Amino acid sequence: MMNRIRNSPRMLAVAIIGALFINVLAQSNPYDKYRNRTYSNKGYLSEEDEMKLAEQIHEELQKQARLVQDPSINEYVNSVGQRLARNSGRPNIPYHFYVVDDKSINAFATLGGRVYVHRGLLAATRSEAQLASVLGHEIGHIVGRHGLENVKKSQKYGLLAGLATIGGAILGGQAGANLGGLAGNMVAGGFLMKHSRDAEREADYLGLYNLKNAGYNTGGMVEMFQTLQEVSNSSPNALGGILASHPPPAERAANTRREIDEHLRGSDRRGLSNTDDFQRLKSGITSSSPTRSRVRPRN
Ligand SMILES: [Zn+2]
């Protein structure tokens, strides 16, 4: 009896420390803070203005980058993208998916429903679910209003003189005349797509659930990050800006794996992984790539 009484404070301490430890473990899933968030344009540009600016930025991008014109590639990427968009946290705006004729592995979203994938990224994917995981991540940036957040920050620091004078109000009418120049500054400044690591993790989180809700095998996302990790080990230059702007692919793979194991158990063993359309796209890209990449002397 005495013994038990004397031991009990220690037992209590052990129990408390144990509970704290378990609590810390339970909280250390980096995605926990994104759960149950709601998103809207409140505090940002109105949806209407966002769409207008996205259109202008697209025109600007077309001056600076070449888009793939092959309808079969565009239609396929759009069909995958639209399927995800319908099942995303922001299904009520129009989405457009474009393929940039660039062999580096990259993808980005601007504002509104505008998503861009490099040809090099398509070439690196091995299943439709992998491609969908990238598109889902980009849609996640749009759902999370990450581009709009960057516009807001830039306004604050006076980087967008045009927008500062408009004060974030309606961009149409007279102010709309300056929109082209404004979009040009945004593209040239490159800050529109420069997200914090936290925003990148949130886009991964939103993308994973989008993938699952669209009926894809969530293992595709883990595989895609593993592919990125392999490429970053062997030829980091091929990754374009991904390595600089996103958390390391190994960390993204681990976060995704953990989320699947803790909250989406079994979602990596069912769902759509590959399609005939994807296989057709791959054979098209492979057969056309020798003509595109000119032979250069190696040194
Ligand atoms: Zn991103």
Image (cartoon, rainbow, N blue to C red):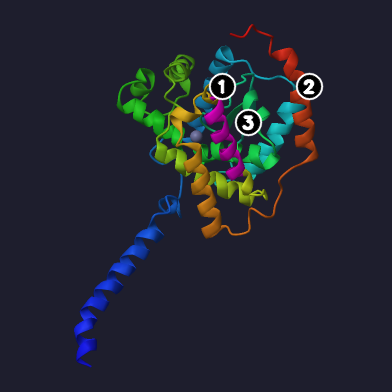
Left or right: 149 with respect to 237? left
Give the class, few, some or many, for how many residues have Cα within 10 Å of label 3's Cα (few <14, many ≥20): some
Magenta residue span: 221-235
Q: Which residue is mark 2?
A: 287
Q: Is residue 167 left or right of residue 254?
A: left
Q: Nearer the viewer, mark 2 or mark 3?
A: 2
Q: Is residue 12 magenta?
A: no
Q: Which residue is disc 3 drawn over?
A: 96
Q: Position of residue 44 (x, y in %)?
A: 41, 36
* Mark 3 element type: strand
Q: Are marks 3 and 1 in contact (CB under 8 Å)?
A: yes
**Viewer-nearest residue: 158 or 198:** 198
Distance between the alpha carbons at the discs numbered 2 and 3 = 26 Å
| On screen, residue 184 above or below 230 | above
Three-letter amino acid code of the residue under disc 2? Ser
Towards the viewer: 193 or 10: 10
Residue 289, percent from left and from top = 73, 19
Task: Name the dominant secondary structure of the magenta segment.
Answer: helix
| Residue 157 in the figure: left or right of residue 65 | left
Q: Residue at x 55, y 57 (%)?
A: 261
Identify residue type, mark 1.
His
- Residue 77 horizontal/vertical position (percent): 69, 32
Q: Is residue 254 above or below residue 109?
A: below
- Circles 2 and 3: CB atoms closer than 8 Å: no
Circle 2 crowding by C-alpha within 10 Å: few under 14, some 14–19, many from 20: few
Mark 2 vs 1: CB contact within 8 A: no
Residue 203 in view of the camera? no
> Quick check: is 225 in the magenta stretch?
yes
> Pointer 1: what residue?
58
Q: Secondary structure at mark 2?
A: helix
